[in-house]
Amino acid sequence: MQVRDKVFVVTGAGSGIGRELSLCLLANGASVAGVDLNPSALETTTTLASAHVDRFRSFVCDVSQRSEVEALPERILAGFRGIDGVINNAGVIQPFVRLRDLDYPAIEHVINVNLFGTLFMIKAFLPHLLCRQEAQIVNLSSMGGFVPVPGQTIYCASKAAVKLMTEGLAAELETTNVKVSVVFPGAVATNILTNSGAGGHERSRNTTPQALPPAEAAKMIVQGIERSAPRIFVGKDAAFMDKLYRLNPGYAAGVIARKMRALLPA
């Protein structure tokens, strides 16, 4: 689906990949309803989108709250002629600790945002998308959605659930006008740790040498949307680990475990 002249809802639009997705879509002629929990972060995105002020509107919403999400389509349709695409980008990680040390509030927060937030958005917007001539749902999973990451076990579980939910939805919608894509970002240079409130480690920003700039990640995702690609890998690391994990799951898991060892407390 070509994004020009289409209306997209982007969650997590206040920072990171979500902000860059909003700006990339606008630069390519789309209109964007940017959704985020953080009003000040949305204000920054709005300022950055000032060259396209007629095509960008911001909406404060906590995607983990079903009642807020269910009210969102009506709020957005008050300012836009329709909704052609939904990009479920909003997500949080957990503190870098082993499962035995992870408390239940942290577990619930990760699952509520990553899995239920995506589910609530799909349920709320799908009836509107089915009424469009063509439409698309794009759900962000993670490289951690198919290969385990020690210290991020619940995050990985939530993203694996997003992967399978997306693939199941795609099968259900195969004969409809709605295309479905799942995105697997690898290392992207965002402040997800700080923005998630996970904390607990001095490396609050992903600064690994191979980490993609968020703008480059957003460009890859938009290109994937325009191809209606069912699977979009963001970064060479994600594409490589997908192949390696399918070839030898145990070896691939070991590679990640060794790389993550330094982040885990003794």
Image: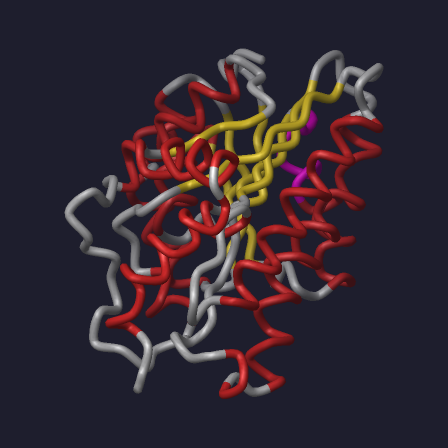
Q: Is residue 58 visible?
A: no
Choose between 118 and 156: the one closer to the eye: 156
- 92 to 213, vertically: above or below: below
Percent x, y of residue 95: 42, 76
Q: Residue at x 67, y 52 (%)?
A: 161
Residue 178 horizontal side relative to residue 97, left or right: right
Which colouring convention does the figure follow? secondary structure
Asked if residue 180 lies in the magenta stretch, the reply is no
Q: Residue at x 78, y 45 (%)?
A: 124
The answer to if 77 sits in the magenta stretch is: yes
On the rendered image, what quadrant is the N terminus found in? Answer: top right
112 on left or right of 237: right
Task: Locate residue 200 relative to residue 246 in the image: left or right.
Answer: left
Q: Residue at x 30, y 30 (%)?
A: 51
- Counting from the top left corner in percent of width and height, residue 46 is at 37, 45
Pick the residue in front: 175 or 69. 175
Q: Position of residue 17 (x, y in %)?
A: 38, 44
Q: Nearer the viewer, residue 182 or 121?
A: 182
What segment carries the magenta color? 76-83
